[in-house]
Image (cartoon, rainbow, N blue to C red):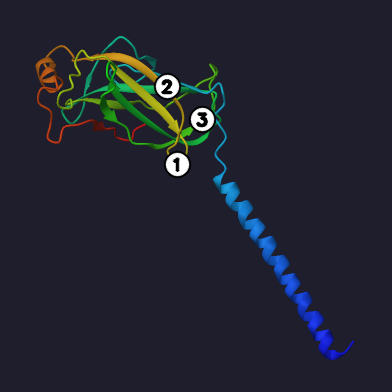
Amino acid sequence: MRPGRQQTAVSRTAVGAMIALAVAALATTVAGCGDEMTPPPPPPSNASIVVGGTDVAGEGFSPLEGDVTMVPGGQGGFHVWLKYRVTGMTPGPMRVRHSAARADDGRPVLVGQSRPVDIGAAGPDGAWEAPTAAPAFMCPAPLGVRIDGTRIRYRVELLDGNDQPIVHGEAMATPHCPAGDLSTFCASICSGASGPPNSGPKTATPAI
């Protein structure tokens, strides 16, 4: 083979190799993008959350239902303690959010912020229980929303890393003002007759 023809053949071979590498790289990129867009697997079909309450000190676990007494907080407001139990979920890091709304029409009372949580291994009863309770702040009530004696729907959600819901649980209860010295003050700020400035649904403080 003449030198010129040999160089042409070598050049064609090199160009062919470069095209093959480019095609392979493009295929790898497309496959990688496909992996990133694959949605997370659905939660186990038996995954569930039980939303409960506690005693006045935020200890223990009990069903959140019927009439519940609101607890005074450190900033002059009143809250209901929330706690939850999870079954059927693989232990690991997740996010959690709680919120509350009026049961009869769904009007928000409390808008939750998500926060990280590490779901642990299930106990002997098959459930993992949140180690601490969270205060679901009820009062001062949003303007036009009476809290004292109104049925409220409390909701706890487990979320993925992008704050997309995975599973949730709900409980219904009717909060009431405590008896005693704080009764009159509680009734006045939980009536919804005169909400605080920029009154609207409160934002839950990350706590559980």
Q: Which residue is mark 2?
A: 169
| Residue 51 screen position, x and y as percent | 40, 20
**From the viewer's perspective, is residue 140 above or below residue 65?**
below
**Proximity of marks 1 and 3: CB atoms separated by less than 8 Å:** no
When asked about the image quadrant of residue 131, the answer is top left
The residue nearer to you, when weighing 171 against 200, is 200
State the residue at coordinates (35%, 20%): 59
| Residue 86 screen position, x and y as percent | 48, 23
Q: Which residue is mark 3?
A: 120
Q: Which of pointers 1 and 3 lies earlier in the amino acid sequence?
A: 3
What amino acid is labelled 3 in the image?
Answer: Gly
Mark 1: few, some, or many residues within 10 Å (few <14, many ≥20)? few
State the residue at coordinates (12%, 31%): 196
From mark 2 to mark 1, how far is it between C-alphas? 19 Å
Q: Farthest residue in the top direction?
A: 66
| Residue 182 screen position, x and y as percent | 13, 18
Mark 2: few, some, or many residues within 10 Å (few <14, many ≥20)? some
Left or right, 205 with respect to 143, comes to: right
Q: Which residue is mark 1?
A: 162
From mark 1 to mark 3, how far is it between C-alphas? 20 Å
Query: Is residue 58 shown to the viewer in this render?
Result: no
State the residue at coordinates (57%, 26%): 44
Left or right, 184 with respect to 37, comes to: left
